């Protein structure tokens, strides 16, 4: 399993709290002494994680232009869950599964923002195609603000086939489409469910769309015709959460 870097205060603190065994060492910006530094440094010391000080220039080079905020964690990469792992987990879930499908989201910042929202909305896993999808890069992990350690991202070879396998296990899929007749708010988003979001502009691919059981649009009141995909994802996930809580 390859090593990777995690940077940003929220992401590093979440990693220390949830998976300290994976942290090899921390590097702090030389000369930085403030509350956030103190909290993370104290946590690292309690856990026995080695720490180093590093000059800003070296930290900038290491993060390859990412906003490290003065802290970088060197981490043992976790085994990425497979398609088979997720299908097995869904088949034996003790509650109605709740998935987020991202089809063609190639911006790491959008992926990270969707991960953060998915965690807040109680999503069990995020599913993306192996091709035409943003990598789980340090930038995505930072934007996710800790969600990268709580919501698994599963890459599948054939998204349409995966959706079909889920449907055979009793799951339904709700997708967004600007030309849909129904409002997304009028769809039934309870029970075993996957919400499918497509790329900005292009939307879902044809086969992905054909495997959706229902389609809905977000009613737009202003002059803009669409939302950023991470914002639209948040709207859809929390509408589903509202309905699912009401159905309990």
Image (tube, grey):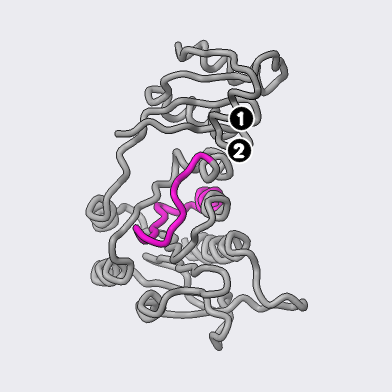
Q: Is residue 121 magenta?
A: yes
Q: Earlier in the sequence, mark 1 or mark 2?
A: 1
Residue at image position (33%, 66%) is: 159
Farthest right residue? 222
Image location of residue 28, percent across then percent down? 60, 19
Residue 235's quadrant in the figure? bottom right
Pointer 1 with pointer 2, Cβ within 8 A: yes
Q: Is residue 99 left or right of residue 64?
A: left
Q: Residue under label 1, please give it.
A: 60
Residue at image position (32%, 43%) is: 80
How many tags in the picture? Answer: 2
For the N terminus, give its image quadrant: top left
C-alpha gap between disc 1 and disc 2: 6 Å
Image location of residue 88, percent across then percent down? 23, 54
Q: Residue under label 2, please give it.
A: 65
Residue 79's quadrant in the figure? top left
Vertical side of 108 occupied by 240: above or below: below
Residue at image position (38%, 58%) is: 127
Q: Is residue 59 magenta?
A: no
- Looking at the image, which is closer to me, 13 or 96? 13
Q: Which residues are magenta?
A: 115-138
- Looking at the image, which is closer to me, 86 or 204? 204
Binning the other alpha carbons within 10 Å of mark 1 as few (below 14), some (14 to 19) or many (20 upward) gives some
- Looking at the image, which is closer to me, 27 or 93? 27
Vertical side of 186 occupied by 91: above or below: above
Residue at image position (40%, 66%) is: 193
Vertical side of 210 occupied by 239: above or below: above
In the rendered image, is residue 163 in sight?
yes
Residue 53's quadrant in the figure? top right
Vertical side of 188 occupied by 149: above or below: above
């Amino acid at each position: 399993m390859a090593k990777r870097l995690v940077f940003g205060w929220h992401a590093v603190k979440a990693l220390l709290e949830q998976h300290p065994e994976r942290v090899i060492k921390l590097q702090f910006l030389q000369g930085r002494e403030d509350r956030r530094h103190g909290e993370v440094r104290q946590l690292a010391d309690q856990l026995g994680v080695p720490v180093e000080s590093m000059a800003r220039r070296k930290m900038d080079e290491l993060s390859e232009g990412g906003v490290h905020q003065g802290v970088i964690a060197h981490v043992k990469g976790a085994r990425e869950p497979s398609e088979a792992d997720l299908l097995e987990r869904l088949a034996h879930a003790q509650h109605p599964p709740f998935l987020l499908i991202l089809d063609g989201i190639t911006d790491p910042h959008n992926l990270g923002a969707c991960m953060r929202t998915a965690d807040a909305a109680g999503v069990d896993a995020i599913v993306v195609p192996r091709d035409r999808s943003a990598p789980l890069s340090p930038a995505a992990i930072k934007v996710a603000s800790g969600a990268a350690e709580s919501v698994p991202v599963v890459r599948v070879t054939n998204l349409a086939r995966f959706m079909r396998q889920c449907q055979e296990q009793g799951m339904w899929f709700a997708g967004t489409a600007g030309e849909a007749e129904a409002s997304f708010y009028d769809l039934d988003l309870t029970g075993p469910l996957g919400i499918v979001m497509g790329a900005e502009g292009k939307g879902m691919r044809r086969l992905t769309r054909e495997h959706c059981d229902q389609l809905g649009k977000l009613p737009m009141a202003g002059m803009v015709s669409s939302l950023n995909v991470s914002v639209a994802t948040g709207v859809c996930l929390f509408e589903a959460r509202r309905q699912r809580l009401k159905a309990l």
